[in-house]
Image: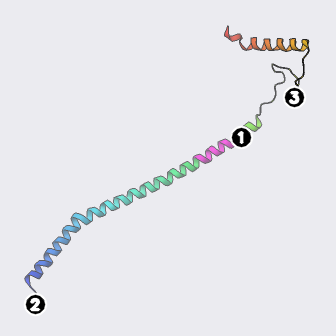
Amino acid sequence: MNINFTLILQFAHFFVAYLLIRSLLVKPAMKVIEREHEEFDHLTHALEIGKKIIVEREREKQRRWEQCQVLFSQNIPGKKEKGIFHFEEVEMGRPALLSREQLVVHVHDLEKAIVEKVKHVR
């Protein structure tokens, strides 16, 4: 077996080139790739947490809406016993005609209501 000095020198050059490429190119590239994977994992985790927060907020919003619906259904405003106008309900169509006395009473009630509403303006 004939081993030539150039063969040994080529092996040494190849080994040195391998070490240089590995230390100068491959290791930094692997570090960058690992850092990007860690950042991706971190962002994925943050996204999952954000989704959980959004789901929880939606549940809270739905729960509050349901509470409001219950509250509104329990506190439906009713008709006032005595309001400004004391007209009796009239069938749709032709309105009922009021007598002069009824008209005077309603105008007087309206006047009192308006005066009461604007008393604080004076």
In the rendered image, which residue does mark 2 sit on? 2
Q: In 3D space, how far apart are the residues under numbered discs 1 and 2 (Cα atoms)?
A: 96 Å
Viewed as shown, does residue 4 lie left or right of 121?
Answer: left
Direction bottom: furthest residue: 1
Q: Quadrant of residue 3?
A: bottom left
Q: Amino acid at mark 3?
A: Gly
Q: Is residue 92 magenta?
A: no
Range shown magenta: 57-70
Precedes in sequence: disc 1 or disc 3: 1
**Relative to 56, is 114 above or below?**
above
Q: Is residue 60 magenta?
A: yes
> What is the total number of numbered labels drawn onto the structure image?
3
Please state, as top left, top right, bottom left or bottom right, where the C terminus lies in the image.
top right
Q: In 3D space, how far apart are the residues under numbered discs 1 and 3 (Cα atoms)?
A: 36 Å
Q: Nearer the viewer, mark 3 or mark 2?
A: 3
Q: Residue at x 71, y 10 (%)?
A: 119
Measuring from the top left, give residue 38's x and y in whole percent. 38, 58
Q: Residue at x 91, y 15 (%)?
A: 99
Measuring from the top left, give residue 81's x and y in whole percent. 84, 24
Choose between 107 and 122: the one closer to the eye: 107
In the rendered image, which residue does mark 1 sit on? 69
